[in-house]
Amino acid sequence: MTGCNEYKLNQGPEDSISAVKFSPSTAQFLLVSSWDCTVRLFDVGGNTMRMKYQHTAPVLDCAFYDPTHSWSGGLDAHLKTHDLNTDQDTIVGTHDAPIRCVEYCPEVNVMVTGSWDRSVRLWDPRTPCNAGTFTQPDKVYTLSVAGDRLIVGTAGRRVLVWDLRNMGYVQQRRESSLKYQTRCIRAFPNKQGYVLSSIEGRVAVEYLDPSQEVQKKKYAFKCHRLKEEGIEQVYPVNAISFHSIHNTFATGGSDGFVNIWDPFNKKRLCQFHRYPTSIASLAFSNDGTMLAIASSYMHEKGDISHPEDAIFIRQVTDAETKPKST
Amino acid sequence: MSTMAEGGDVDWELSKENIQPLRRGRDISALHQALSQREEGPTSAVNQQKQMFESELRMYDGDDPLSVWDRYIKWTEQTFPQGGKESNLSTLLERAVTRFTDEKMYHNDPRYVELWIKFAENCPEPLDIYRYMQAQGIGVTQASLYIAWSEEYENQGNYQKADLVYQEAFKKCAEPHDRLLQFHKALQARVSRQVFLKLENGSSDEEPKQPERVSLAHLKHRGKKKAIAPVNRTGTAIKRVTGGLQTHGVPVLGNVSNSQLLIFDENKAEAAGPSEPTLEPWVAPPTSRAKENEQNPAKWCDVKMPQKTKFGHAVMPPPPPKPTFQPFVEESDQPPTMTPCKINPAVNSVLSARKPRTEETPLKRLQEQQHKKAEAGKLQEQSMYCKELLLSGATEFCFEELRAEHFFKKMAQESQKAGGEGCQAAAAAAAAN
C-alpha cells in the first residue's frame, strides 16, 4: 500500500507515538516521542534510528531547540534537554503535573511548556533555566507559537493568546468557536491566525487581529467523518501541520485519513490513502517537501487491540500542497 | 496559638455573607482554609484534589459508583463555601443525578435522594424537580424528600400543600417515620401560630411598607464566578426565608393558642392565597417564563426623548443654528496627549453582545437526556471515541489524561507488588535464619 513516494520508518517506537517533529534546518532528521518512554532521532534519508534517550515515564511531546538539542516532557513532569551530539541528558525543571506540550519560539528565543497543572512555563534554552510560570484557567491541552505570540488551548474549550515579550497579562481570552473539546492548535506560518481542531470532526480557521473585518473571515468546517450504513461516524481530529511556504495545512484524524487544505480558497487539496489506524501526529519538513505521518492508536476507545504503531514519510508535491491560483 | 485562632475567627466573621448555609453544617478547619485562599483563587492543592476526584470518577470499577460522586460533592461544598460558578457544584449535581436516573438500586438510596434535594435547591423551580422525582419514583420512600418538598411549599406560603405533602408521605410509608412525624408536628405548630398571629393583627397593614431587612434570609448572590452577597438586602435580593423563629425540627410544646405566651416573630410571613387541595401529578415541562426587562445593548448618549406638545404629538426641536463667528482657540492649545494604555483597547472589540439564548432549565435538560436515550437507536451521528468517559465529571478529560491515569494506576500496583515480594523475601530470609 505504500507507494514509491512513501515509506515506513524502521526501528519505530514500541508503543503509541505522541509527537513527530522535523529538524528546523534539514529534512534529514526527525524527532519522535512515544508512550514507550523514549525520544528517538531518525535519519529520514537513510531510514535509520540515530539515537534514543529515555524518560522515566511516557513522553507526550518533544521539540527541537536547535539542530543539535532536543527538549521533551511527559508524564514524569520532568522537562529534559538532550544534546544530540554528545548524547547527554539534562533535567531543566519540572511541572506539578504531566507536561503535555513543548514548543520553541525562535523570535523570543524561549522554550515553552504547557502542562495539566494549569500552567505554561517559559525556559531560557541557553542557561537552561526557568524564566517564568504563567497560570492558565484550566489544564493545557495544546499550544502553538505565532511569531512572538503564544496561543494556548485548554480544557473547557478556552483559548488564550499571550504576548511572549510581555507576559504580564493575557492579550486575548477567547472561547473555541467549536462546540467540543480542543484537540490541537497550530499557528499559520504567516503569523496571522491559527487553526484549531476539535474532538468531533471539525476544524476552525481563526485570525488573531481582533478588528471586525478580519474576524469576519473566520470559519469552520466539518471533516474526518465517514458515512457507514446511514450513520455518520465522527472522528477526533488529532493533528495539524502547516506547510511553511504555502500556508496550507494537513489534518490527521482518528479515521486514519490525512487531508491537505487550502485555507484561502476553502478547498481540500487532496486526501491520502487510509492509514492503518488513528493519525496521532503530523509534521511537514521545514522546506515543505516531506510529511511525517504518525499512525498510532491513541486509546480513543480504551485499551483494545489495534494495528501496529508506525511512522510514514511521504514525499509531497506542489500539486498536493500549493493553493490553486484562480 | 491564640492569636492564630483569633485571626481565623475574624476571617470567618468578616466573610459570613459569602458562606452558603449547609444543612449538615461546615467543617470549621475546611472553612478557614477555604476563606484564607479566597482572594487568590483555588490553589494547586485544591486543583490536585479535584483532579483526583475527577479521575476516580472515571477509573472506578467497584459496585458503588455513587460513593465517589457523593464524596466529591461533599468535598466541593466544603471547599467552596461561597458557591458560585467556580465551584461547579450545580454542574456536578446535575451530572450526578442524571447519571443514575436509570439505576433502580439507587432510587431510594438516602445519599442519592440527598443529591436530588441539593440539586433541586439549586434550581429556580425546586417544586418541579420534586414532582419529577415523584413521577420517576426517586426517593418516594424517603422522608427527606417529603420534608424538603413540604418546606419548599411552606417557604412559598402554601401551608395547605405543605401539609398535603406529609399526607402523601404517610401514605407511602416513607422512612424514617419518626423523623417525618417530628417535622410534620413542627409544621403544624408553625402554621397554627401564623394563623393566630394573623388574627391578632387583623388587617392593619394597609399601606405598603418600606422594604425591611429580614433576618436570617437567604440572599441571592451576585457575580458569576465568585458569589458575593449583595449590598441591598431587601425585596428581590432575598431568595427565601428559613430559620429564624420558625426553627425546623423543634416541636413546639404546650398549647400553641396560649395568648399569654406569644412569641414575637419579626418576619411575620403572610400566608399566600388560596390553592386547590390536590397534588397535581407531573404532566408536562414547565413553560419557560419570558424574561422581563431584557434590553438590547444600545448607545445611551445622544439619545433624545421625543418631546410632546400640548396637542399630544411629538415635535423635534429645531437644530441649533451654526455660530456665525469663529470660536477662539488659544494658539498654544495642544490636543491632550494620550496616556499609554496598558491593555490594548482594540482587544475589547472581540467581545460581542451575548447572543439570545433559548431558556434552558435543568429540568428540561433532564428530560432531554431521557429523550435522547430513547432515541439512541435512530441516532444519525456517532462519536468514534469514549465520549462518556471524557465528559462524565465536572471538567473534561482528554485521551492522554485518561491513559495517564491508567498508567499511574498500573505503576502503583506494580510497585506495591514489588514491595510485597520484597517483604516476603525478607520474611523468608528471617524464617531461614
Image (cartoon, coloured by chain):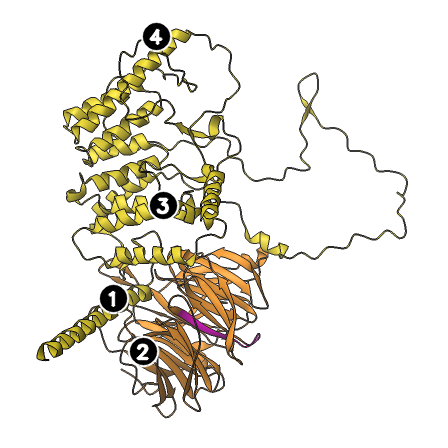
Chain colours: A orange, B yellow
Q: What residue sits right under mark 3 in the picture?
A: B78
Question: Looking at the image, is A277 positioned above or below residue B395?
Answer: below
Residue A39 disc label: none
Q: Is residue A70 visible?
A: yes
Residue B314 in picture, x, y percent from top left: 67, 24
Q: Amino acid at mark 4?
A: Ser
- For the point 22% across and 24% down, the residue is B182
Q: Nearer the viewer, mark 3 or mark 4?
A: 4
| Secondary-structure class at tag 1 | helix
Name the N-terminal-most of marks 4 and 1.
Answer: 4
| Secondary-structure class at tag 2 | loop
Co-location on one chain, circles 4 and 2: no
Q: Nearer the viewer, mark 4 or mark 1?
A: 4
Q: What residue sits right under mark 4 in the picture?
A: B259
10 Å crowding of disc 3: few (<14), some (14-19), many (20+): many
Name the N-terminal-most of marks 3 and 4.
Answer: 3
Q: Main secondary structure of the magenta part?
A: strand
Whole-angstrom CA distance, mark 3 to mark 4, is 43 Å
Q: Amino acid at mark 1?
A: Lys
Co-location on one chain, circles 2 and 1: no
Q: Tell me if residue A326 is in the magenta stretch.
A: no
Residue A56 in picture, x, y percent from top left: 32, 77
Residue A277 in picture, x, y percent from top left: 27, 73
10 Å crowding of disc 2: few (<14), some (14-19), many (20+): many
Q: What residue sits right under mark 1 in the picture?
A: B409
- For the point 33% across and 48% down, the residue is B75
Q: What residue sits right under mark 2 in the picture?
A: A37
